[in-house]
Image (spheres, rainbow, N blue to C red):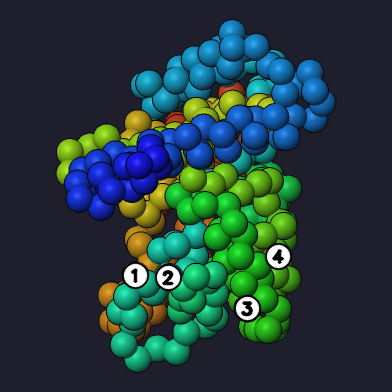
Amino acid sequence: MSSTKSDASAAATNPNHASAAAAATDDAELLARRIELLAVSAPAAAAAATTTAEQQQGAAEADAATDDGSAEAEDLPADAEAAVRKTLVLIDFNEFLVFRDKKRAVRAAKADFRAGRATTFNFYVRPGAMEFVAQLAQDPRCEFAVYTSMKRANMLEFAHAFDEFQAERGSAAMRPVPCGATGVTTTTASSLARGGLAIFDRPFNAPDRSPGKDAWDTVRDLGLIFDVPAVRDRGYSAANTVLIEAESHKIGRWAANSVQPAAFTAETINKGGSDDELFRLGESLQAAFTAMQAPGACIPRVLAATAYPAFAPTTTA
């Protein structure tokens, strides 16, 4: 019997063996994807060949900015000091902008769109999602990137489906929202798939080693994002990056950089009523971007001083 058949037989009879094999395969895929993205994101071959020492230095700078929840201006490299006025905002997709109904848990509401490959899911778009994406895409004081635990192919398909939904709704369905300097507003939709800096998919998450977690569970790891040349070359670090994450257990050690909004779930939809979370969050981020224009400003301190309640995330699962 071949080794492949032996492994398949062992996996079929031993669930632990199957779980370990799946985790090992997943880890190998994630490592390959990280290497691929670290290479293709570089503006030139030299950038793609960044030395280990430089990567360790970048990680140390990120750690220094979050260890005590602050980063002094003099601790930042010269290029980051220049770029700190532009903030990188990392946003999740599922249970933040939309709810993907895997179990048909939504009772009455009609799905806003359907998407999926092997399985087609119902998606429900959160009120204010179009406006929130437009704010981030069109505000010159920030850039956004999608940060997800999904695989890239799935996230891209869902992002394009979201954009098709926006196109069908049209900008006339949008509420005017602040976007940039005082008095500037927008009612024009922006692409989720193409409007951001990047889509950081599953390889940019770390395995969740907490007790009781499954092999596929992950937590956010901004250090992996800061290692990407396209991010580093723009001067982004823990000093000027915001992580928006509705699931508290995924925040990990990045609490000083995190905003924890209320999750958008089947329960939220079934309950009905108004949901203005994204509008409130958008206004608060506008205030944060303004505060980041001050010399020496850094995101951990700005978030700590901003009055949005979710800027003080919990750290329990």
User: Mark 3 or 2 closer to N-term?
Assistant: 2
- Circle 1 crowding by C-alpha within 10 Å: few under 14, some 14–19, many from 20: many
Q: Marks 4 and 2: which is nearer the front?
A: 2
The Cα–Cα distance between marks 3 and 1, rounded to whole angstroms, is 19 Å
Numbered circle sitting on residue 99: 2
Q: Marks 4 and 3: which is nearer the front?
A: 3
User: Mark 1 or 4 closer to N-term?
Assistant: 4
- The residue where tag 1 is placed is 265
**Which residue is rendered at x = 58% and y = 16% of the image?**
55
Do the CB atoms of the residues marked 4 and 3 lie less than 8 Å apart?
A: no
- Circle 3 crowding by C-alpha within 10 Å: few under 14, some 14–19, many from 20: some
User: What amino acid is at disc 3?
Assistant: Phe
- The residue where tag 4 is placed is 190
239 vs 216, left or right, is right
- The residue where tag 3 is placed is 165
66 and 122: which is toward the camera: 122
User: Mark 4 or 3 closer to N-term?
Assistant: 3
